[in-house]
Image: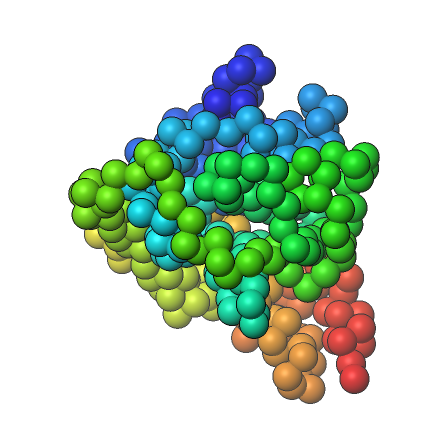
């Protein structure tokens, strides 16, 4: 939010971009749903003509903006300890994302992943997250350190020279993962300002935040379960779901909105998920699939499918045929 504040973009405008209520765009910790964050960063990069917005944010970040994760960084006795903590608590910074640190002989692969499959949509987030990690290593090493190798899942963003300051020159694009490699010996680097005596306090706080995130994910999982069970029941609407969850429909709408969802979008997502599975794993007719998913008219099902997938159910089946 610091970037948007500095560019005089208020919460109402941001909420309008992602079609959310301004009151629910941010949760109690000041975080927003992952998909909303990614869309807003992409929008900002275009609006402010900053093609490398992720890199810019990484080079201008302040450790304090990461809250408890920033404190864990200053409490860690060495870089290896910080990496372990980051691997566990990255989701607090951005829900649905994580860092993994993978042994690769004398090197360590730092791999950044998100739950969003659209690699171009996640490009700024990947460049930001990995850029912050490299800036962190440079802080530990006290010099202009660069990774041994860096891979991006997305296509190169011009100008390509903008990558040099953080990532050096050994870059590869359109790869399987967003990753960079560093020497295993860096794990032993210490930070002079480290305060390890505060680590238990900060870890306890991080555990509480993580538990809150996981609880909200459990809530969404339970909502999906109820929707799946009642998918063919036309009478099962928002009111019925709210009653099942022992809350008002207004409360249910607010909680789903905070997670970046609504009743209709979740229902359609489940319909599409089940429809695609049936099309790929069975020879069932489209009319039969439509009926099983609660559509009395197959034409209505076909319209919904085409609107979401850009092709008819039969075209989808043919395009995935072996």
Q: Is residue 58 left or right of residue 23?
A: right
Does residue 266 sit above or below 121 in this rendering? below
- Place of residue 15 in the rendered image (x, y in percent of width and height, measured from the top left): 51, 28
In this picture the colour scheme is rainbow
- Place of residue 214 in the rendered image (x, y in percent of width and height, measured from the top left): 32, 55
In this view of the protein, which residue sits in the foreground, 310 or 322?
322
Identify which residue is drawn at 75% across, 46% down: 169
The answer, for residue 311, to whether it is visible in the render is: yes
Residue 180 picture quarter: bottom right
In this view of the protein, which residue sits in the foreground, 289 or 98?
98
> Which residue in the rendered view is the most extreme toward the top?
8
In the rendered image, the quadrant that contains the C terminus is bottom right
Residue 196 picture quarter: top left
Residue 228 picture quarter: bottom left
In this view of the protein, which residue sits in the foreground, 178 or 303?
178
- Place of residue 321 in the rendered image (x, y in percent of width and height, measured from the top left): 78, 81
Identify which residue is drawn at 68% across, 35% down: 165
The answer, for residue 250, to whether it is visible in the render is: no
Identify which residue is drawn at 60% across, 58% down: 181
- Place of residue 274 in the rendered image (x, y in percent of width and height, measured from the top left): 56, 71
Does residue 14 sit above or below 195 in this rendering? above
Q: Is residue 180 left or right of residue 46?
A: left
> Which residue in the rendered view is the most extreme toward the bottom?
283
Identify which residue is drawn at 67% across, 44% down: 167
């Amino acid at each position: 939010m610091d970037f948007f504040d500095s560019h005089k973009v208020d919460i109402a405008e941001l909420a309008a971009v992602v079609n959310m209520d301004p009151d629910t765009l941010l949760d109690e910790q000041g975080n927003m749903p992952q998909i909303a964050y990614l869309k807003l960063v992409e929008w900002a990069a275009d609006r402010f003509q900053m093609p490398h917005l992720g890199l810019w944010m990484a080079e201008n970040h302040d450790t304090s903006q990461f809250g408890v994760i920033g404190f864990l960084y200053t409490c860690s006795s060495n870089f290896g300890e910080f990496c372990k903590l980051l691997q566990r608590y990255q989701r607090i910074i951005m829900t649905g994302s994580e860092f993994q640190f993978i042994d690769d002989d004398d090197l360590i692969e730092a791999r950044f992943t998100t739950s969003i499959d659209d690699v171009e949509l996640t490009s700024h987030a990947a460049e930001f997250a990995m850029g912050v990690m490299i800036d962190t290593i440079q802080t530990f090493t006290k010099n202009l350190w660069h990774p041994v190798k860096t891979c991006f899942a997305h296509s190169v963003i011009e100008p390509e020279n903008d990558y040099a300051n953080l990532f050096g020159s050994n870059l590869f694009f359109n790869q399987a993962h967003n990753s960079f490699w560093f020497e295993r010996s860096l794990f032993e680097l210490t930070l002079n300002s480290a305060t390890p005596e505060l680590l238990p306090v900060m870890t306890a706080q991080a555990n509480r935040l993580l538990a809150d995130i996981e609880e909200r994910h459990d809530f969404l999982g339970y909502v999906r379960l109820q929707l799946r069970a009642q998918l063919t029941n036309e009478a099962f609407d928002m009111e019925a779901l709210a009653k099942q969850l022992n809350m008002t429909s207004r409360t249910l709408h607010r909680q789903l909105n905070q997670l970046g969802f609504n009743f209709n979008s979740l229902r359609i997502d489940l319909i599409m998920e089940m429809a695609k599975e049936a099309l790929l794993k069975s020879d069932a007719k489209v009319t039969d699939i439509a009926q099983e998913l609660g559509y009395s008219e197959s034409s209505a099902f076909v319209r919904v499918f085409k609107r979401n997938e850009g092709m008819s159910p039969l075209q989808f089946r043919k395009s995935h045929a072996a």
